[in-house]
Image (spheres, rainbow, N blue to C red):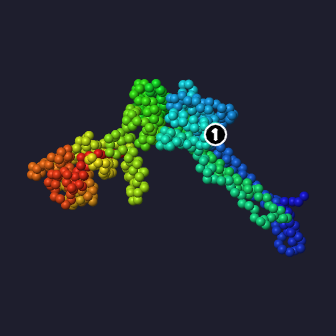
Amino acid sequence: MDRAPASRAAAAAAAAGDGAGRDGVGVKRRCPTDGGKESDARDGILTGIQQGQRVIEALKEMLTDLEQREVKMGGTAAPDKPSGELLREVLQFNLSGEPFSARRSALCAAKGSVLAVMYCGKFDAAFIRDEKNRIFLMIHAPAFKWLVGELIMYEGEQIETVALPPSKQKDAPYKYWAELLLSDPSAKRRATHDSVAIPPAQEGQQGMGGEQPKDDALCRSLELTSIIKRAMEDKAAQEARLEAIRPLLKTGNSEEDSLVSIEVSGATVTVTKAVATSLGDDSTFANRFLKYDPLTVEVPIEYVQRVVDIVARAQIKGAAPTALDVHGAQGELAPKAYRHALTMYGLAADRFLGPADALLTTDHLQQMRDWTPRFANRPNIPPCVGEPVMRIYKATVDGWRWLDFFDAVKGHSPLLLIFRVADGNELFASLIKGPIEGTDSHTYVGYIGRTRKMCVAGTQEKVTNLLDFSSPASSLTAVLSMACSSFGVRPAAQQISIGAPAAASDEMMKRCQGSMLEETQPDEWRQWQCSGRSSGRATTVMTMVTKCTCLCQ
């Protein structure tokens, strides 16, 4: 029998060495006494076996780590029933108060999804259960029912894919739950990683004796590298799925996992106590479930379901509800009724949606964030102008005097002052990043504008350095002015010397302490005797002052 090439080479080398020693030609090599020459041919193989065993152990550790994570979450390492029997089961649900049934096979139809892992059978003991032993799921019931209906058709090959229709793509409850439950963390890997290509053998590469060398080891080593990388990515994807379902399982705290309910026009709305108290133990939302009369007929059930889902999603994300959450949850609900439901359950509608009669709402801010990148050299909205926006002053509501304004805005920051042209849609705004304060009212002295002297309405202090309003030499805390304009406060003494403005102008200004002056004109009131002047800039801006609104974050 012909020996392997390595054995033949070793025998030939030994024979050549022996012959050289006998002929007295060349240098005789030392022959190890422990058979080292034979073992040298196997060292690479033995090392490969050792490394392979280490890889196997590492893969086993990865599997054990995943199983331990599942057990810590209340699950099991493997389902306790055969796969076929599990998939035929019909599961009974309590969807935030609504009863529902679904076959497990439909829930697992989207392979690799968060939903499929959640109902694979490993976590049945980890679900919160109601008094009828139904699986309690803190979810927007209409969205989950729609999703299961789509999965039933997908399983039956009646549709090719499950996707939100255009009418629901901006509806936050549908969008959030569909994206969360149908997400597959491993899909990106499958889309970007192909099978490993094995390089073909080069022509003329032959072993001793004209034999083609075997490349099984090379092929397997390349496959092993791909397998290890795929295993690591699959582990990371499974960990992402587990983190996604964790908030929907038991927390281990029986008090937080207990269920509390209210009755809305004959329908039941149920949440966990953790969700009920997520806005505060004594919040209006918590009291609706824990202290107040649980029966209400003041709002339709769909309004309450959406408000409750806002709070539930915020609790899952570990954050307070945002204006974007509240805007997105409105769907096709009537705006006034939606505001009423929000306020009724402790989510101040004016805070999250902006006042109904406001010049600026949080929705406007979001639109501006979307629009500004489309224009060149347009700065983004500063981060300090965040959400929600809350109106703290409106001249027609809170008073026209400077002290009314200062009292309303004191301590708030940042501030956004908005002026609207009367009988028009033009808006002008100024942002003040820091809080401002006012002083007691004083007789007006001087004027405010782009000059070397400046004073603040309501004070007698003068500022000489306009570039640094925080100068230590001055106790001035804030300056309000329009760019490229002068601003004056009407002094009582001047009314005697120059007379009151004409009736039309006076009617417009009788509740306003300020007026705009052209820079080249004297500090007098005579130019305001006619409100319909062709000098539209001054008249327009004067009107803007009478429509002042101030917002803060």
Q: Residue furthest left?
A: 497
Q: Position of residue 421 (x, y in %)?
A: 27, 49
Amino acid at dot 1: Glu
Q: Nearer the viewer, residue 83 or 150?
A: 150
Q: Nearer the viewer, residue 194 or 476?
A: 194
Residue at the image point whose x is 45% and y is 32% from the top = 302
Please say if 151 is above or below 288.
Answer: below
Would you identify the image quadrant in which residue 7 lies?
bottom right
- Look at the numbered disc 1 and give the secondary structure of its residue: loop
Residue at the image point whose x is 16% and y is 56% from the top = 523
Residue at the image point whose x is 41% and y is 26% from the top = 297
The N terminus: image quadrant:
bottom right
Please say if 209 is above or below 529.
Answer: below
In this image, 380 relative to 215: left or right?
left
- Residue 396 seen in the current view: yes
CA neighbours of label 1 inside 10 A, class few (<14), some (14 to 19), many (20+)? few
In this image, 532 relative to 38: left or right?
left
Q: Position of residue 152 (x, y in %)?
A: 60, 36
Would you identify the image quadrant in which residue 522 lies?
bottom left
- Residue 471 seen in the current view: no
Q: Nearer the viewer, residue 218 or 517?
A: 517
The residue singled out by tag 1 in the image is: 157
Would you identify the image quadrant in which residue 379 lies?
bottom left
Q: Position of residue 249 (x, y in %)?
A: 55, 35
Residue at the image point whose x is 39% and y is 37% from the top = 335
Q: Position of residue 81 (x, y in %)?
A: 68, 32
In this image, 474 relative to 103: left or right?
left
